[in-house]
Image (tube, rainbow, N blue to C red):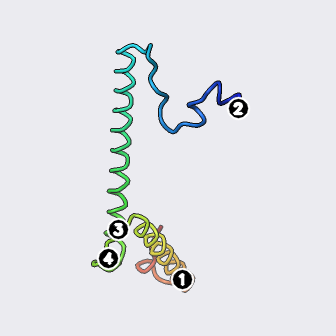
Amino acid sequence: MMHLKKKFPHALFSKTMPEMTENETPSKKQHRKKNRETHNAVERHRKKKINAGINRIGELIPCSPALKQSKNMILDQAFKYITEMKRQNDELLLNGGNNEQVFTL
């Protein structure tokens, strides 16, 4: 493992990008900065979409309106709600429920 640290010190032990070296050209620094900014923008957009989806799910789940739900709570309640709806649906199917009562998942 020690030989890997000497060859690739940044690859195994650093969570950030390797430091820019003194001999790096200004255009290379600018390119690296632009890549980082682009990646950060893409990541912000991805997180925004995930959060919007979780919030939409939270609006569909029955819960106390006074309770501020975290993302974790929303996902946990969604799992419980969907599991219960599936159980009820399966029970209707087993008991010969008519087509209007049974949900298709």
**Residue 39 against residue 74 in the figure, above or below:** above
Please tell me the numbered disc located at residue 2.
2
* Residue at image mark 3: 58
Q: Residues within 10 Å of mark 4 (few under 14, many from 20)?
A: few
Q: Earlier in the sequence, mark 2 or mark 4?
A: 2
Q: Residue 1: x percent and y percent?
A: 71, 34
Which amino acid lies under the numbered mark 1 shown in the image of this protein?
Glu
What residue appears at the point 34 percent right and 21 percent down from the top-left corner?
Answer: 30
Camera-side mark, 1 or 2: 2
Q: Residue 14: x percent and y percent?
A: 54, 36
* Residue at image mark 4: 67
| Quadrant in the rendering for residue 43 | top left
Circle 2 sits in a helix, a strand or a loop, which is it?
A: helix
Contact? badges 3 and 2 (CB < 8 Å) = no
What residue appears at the point 53 percent right and 80 percent down from the top-left corner?
Answer: 93
* Residue at image mark 1: 91
Q: Earlier in the sequence, mark 3 or mark 1?
A: 3
